[in-house]
């Protein structure tokens, strides 16, 4: 039942408990209990809205930064990861396989903001060996949703057998 | 002066067609009237078809269909139903299930042969029987049996002229399914006679019961007397590609290919190449769509009950078949008034056979927002 509930909520956080109960065929009380438990256990980490900021007046820019670091003895990458993710600008942080160690997604108001973050905060960190900053030019798809264009029309006939 | 045969003149035109002509002229119509998915064909399938066109794969295929597709079909039948068919002798790729129905009937009907048709059902069955020179005999199904065809109702209608029975489960328009135990009961009757089962299983992948769809061909002693029809339209949202297939006894498939080669030549090549990709790499897409339909199904059943409309819980396809007899209108009147007064299109149950009287078909192949809009209009209509 947990997975069924989570699948519903992942796509629409606005669903009411009753709606989830109908959609999944589960009892309303049981759904409410499960959601409360999943929140407590930290399986559900929050309820967010996916916004296409490019359609608004908001000034913002996103960058993806590749970071090479020296892992700390006994703590691996966790220590440096924690140092980095505590910055508000960092929206996501992943430990990567391959050519570099950490990948972060950073958001700021302007290129200047992000340059400042990289040169003043990130690069000087002791275990950071190098950084490569890539600015996002256009977001085509985010969290499974296509961000460009309009919803396609329903071109089906009104009635068909 | 008219050159048209009496047979075609006598053929009733599809009830859906009449309704469609009216609805198509109107503006701001919300519809629960379509018999096709609202999803787009999965991108990997579309991409494969585009790739094939870029690489000039535009020639005819063999009459029976691309060998790779016939093999993929046989793999599917084996994996899904443990049914073993030979790709070279027991499969034909057709232009949708529609063509498969037509050529199957033409291959088996001698003038005057009787074909049992479990109704309500897809609109073409009766017409195709008549065009092939046969006589369609209705086997009605009833709401009190969740529209599952009953052995007794079949047995009563079997005569020495009975050649075949046409079944469609999961069912359009009712959303009914036949579970193993239901099939066993009718097989007992069918096995006593020499009757071919034409089983249209195009909605097989859209089953919401505990157990997966059971093909009647997989029951004991039914393999030799069953022709299974299936296609890509519903499971893979590929209606416009027009791609289906038939699996069955060698002599019957050979006869069908004989007709198919003269009238069709082969199913469209681009569609066939897309079909290979769909069968090979489409499982997760089917699962995603199926679970989305299931959510809508639960939502609709719940909403109808809250509106006080009697509706058995459909476990297949993407239709609800609620009973509207309590409102004192015939199916057709109900649908006409609903369309005129609230601009909501649903299809009269009678379009699918006389025993559909008192019912309407509501498709839930729409987004939840659309469904909510439709339910608002329906509630307003019932309130007035």
Image (tube, coloured by chain):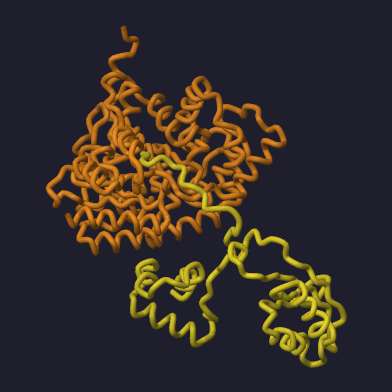
Which residue, as the protein is rendered here, is positioned at the far right?
A129
| Chain identifier matching the orange colour in the rendered picture | B
The image shows residue B230 at horizontal and vertical percentages of 46, 41
The image shows residue A129 at horizontal and vertical percentages of 87, 81
Q: Quadrant of residue B202?
A: top left
Task: Work out whether B300 lies above or below B343.
Answer: below
Q: Residue at x 58, y 34 (%)?
A: B88
Which residue, as the protein is rendered here, is positioned at the far bottom?
A74
Q: Quadrant of residue B112?
A: top left
The image shows residue B247 at horizontal and vertical percentages of 48, 38
The image shows residue B201 at horizontal and vertical percentages of 41, 44
Which residue, as the protein is rendered here, is positioned at the far left?
B328
Taking the image as drawn, is residue B367 in sight? yes
Quadrant that contains the N terminus of chain A: bottom left
| Chain identifier matching the yellow colour in the rendered picture | A
Taking the image as drawn, is residue B195 in sight? no
Quick check: B136 left or right of A84? left
Q: Nearer the viewer, residue B254 or B62?
A: B62
Q: Residue at x 67, y 38 (%)?
A: B52
Quick check: A29 left or right of A137? left
Quadrant that contains the C terminus of chain A: top left
Q: How many marks?
A: 0
Q: Nearer the viewer, residue A9 or A126?
A: A126
Q: Nearer the viewer, residue B153 or A47?
A: A47
Task: Work out whether B290 lies above or below B149.
Answer: below
Q: Quadrant of residue B300?
A: bottom left
Q: Residue at x 80, y 76 (%)?
A: A115
Quick check: B93 left or right of B347? right
Task: Work out whether B169 lies above or below B9.
Answer: below
Q: Nearer the viewer, residue B262 or B324?
A: B324
């Amino acid at each position: 039942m947990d997975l069924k509930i989570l699948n519903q909520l992942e796509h629409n956080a606005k669903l009411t408990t009753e709606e989830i109960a109908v959609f999944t065929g589960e009892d309303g009380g049981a759904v409410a209990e499960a959601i409360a438990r999943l929140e407590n256990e930290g399986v559900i980490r929050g309820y967010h809205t996916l916004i296409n900021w490019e359609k608004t007046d908001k000034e913002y820019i996103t960058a993806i930064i590749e970071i090479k670091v020296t892992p700390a003895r006994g703590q691996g990458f966790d220590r440096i990861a924690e140092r980095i993710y505590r910055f508000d600008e960092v929206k996501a942080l992943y430990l990567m396989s391959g050519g570099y160690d950490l990948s972060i997604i950073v958001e700021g108001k302007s290129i200047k903001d992000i340059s400042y973050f990289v040169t003043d905060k990130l690069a000087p960190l002791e275990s950071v060996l190098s950084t490569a900053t890539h600015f996002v030019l256009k977001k085509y798809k985010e969290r499974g949703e296509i961000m460009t264009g309009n919803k396609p029309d329903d071109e089906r006939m009104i009635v068909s057998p | 002066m008219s050159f048209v045969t009496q047979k075609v003149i006598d053929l009733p035109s599809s009830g859906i067609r009449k309704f469609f002509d009216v609805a198509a002229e109107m503006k701001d119509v919300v519809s629960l009237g379509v018999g096709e998915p609202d999803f787009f064909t999965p991108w990997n399938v579309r991409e494969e078809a585009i790739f094939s066109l870029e690489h000039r794969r535009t020639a005819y295929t063999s009459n029976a269909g691309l060998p790779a597709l016939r093999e993929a079909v046989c793999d599917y039948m084996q994996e899904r139903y443990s049914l073993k068919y030979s790709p070279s002798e027991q499969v034909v790729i057709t232009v949708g299930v529609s063509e498969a129905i037509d050529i199957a009937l033409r291959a088996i009907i001698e003038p005057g042969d009787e074909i049992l048709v479990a109704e309500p059902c897809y609109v073409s069955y009766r017409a195709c029987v008549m065009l092939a020179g046969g006589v369609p005999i209705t086997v009605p199904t009833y709401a009190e049996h969740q529209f599952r065809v009953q052995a007794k109702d079949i047995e009563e209608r079997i005569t020495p002229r009975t050649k075949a029975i046409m079944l469609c489960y999961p069912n359009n328009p009712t959303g009914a399914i036949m579970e193993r135990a239901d099939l066993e009961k009718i097989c007992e009757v069918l096995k006593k006679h020499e009757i071919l089962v034409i089983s249209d299983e195009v909605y097989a992948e859209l089953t919401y019961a505990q157990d997966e769809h059971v093909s009647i061909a997989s029951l004991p002693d039914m393999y030799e007397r069953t022709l299974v029809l299936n296609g890509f339209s519903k499971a893979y949202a590929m209606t416009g590609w027009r791609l289906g297939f038939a699996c069955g006894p060698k002599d019957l498939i050979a006869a069908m290919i004989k007709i198919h080669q003269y009238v069709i030549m082969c199913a469209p090549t681009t569609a066939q190449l897309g079909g290979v990709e769909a069968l090979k790499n489409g499982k997760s897409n089917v699962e995603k769509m199926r679970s989305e339909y299931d959510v809508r199904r639960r939502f609709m059943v719940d909403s109808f009950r809250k509106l006080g409309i009697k509706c058995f819980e459909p476990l297949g396809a993407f239709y609800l078949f609620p009973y509207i007899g309590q409102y004192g209108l015939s199916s057709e009147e109900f649908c006409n008034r609903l369309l005129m007064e609230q601009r909501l299109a649903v299809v009269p149950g009678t379009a699918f056979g006389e025993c559909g009287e008192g019912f309407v078909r509501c498709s839930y192949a729409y987004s939840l927002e659309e469904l909510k809009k439709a339910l608002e209009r329906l509630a307003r209509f019932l309130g007035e």
